[in-house]
Image (cartoon, rainbow, N blue to C red):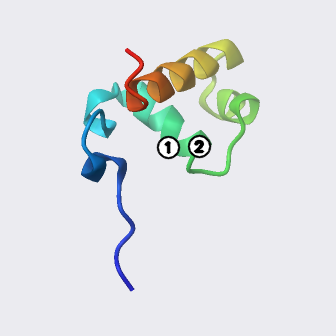
Amino acid sequence: MSAQASLDQFGGPGFSDLTEAEREVYTNIVRGEYGVREYARETERRPGTVGNLLRRARDKLEGST
């Protein structure tokens, strides 16, 4: 069985392009077990802040910015 590929292996934007907060939110929501509101409560952030961080992370990883 081979190791799972990471986004960084495909070229273009990768996790190194994200801020620490964007990386944390993306990892815990998209790859993790949290929803936006649940993660906001867990980290004592506002849901809008978490949503904005997630959107920015997705935009960067898709090369939109």
Vertical position of residue 58 compared to residue 29: above or below:
above
Q: Residue at x 75, y 28 (%)?
A: 37
Q: State left or right for residue 21 relative to residue 8.
A: right
Q: State left or right for residue 11 relative to residue 31.
A: left
Q: Which residue is mark 2?
A: 30
Task: State the quadrant of the N terminus.
Answer: bottom left
Disc 2, SS: loop
Question: Three-letter amino acid code at disc 2?
Answer: Val
Vertical position of residue 1 compared to residue 27: above or below:
below
Locate residue 52, reporting x and y percent. 57, 15
Q: State left or right for residue 33 relative to residue 27.
A: right
Locate residue 5, reporting x and y percent. 35, 62
Q: Which residue is more in the foreground, 33 or 58? A: 58
Callout 2 crowding tier (Cα within 10 Å): few <14, some 14–19, many ≥20: few
Vertical position of residue 6 compared to residue 47: above or below:
below
Q: How many marks?
A: 2
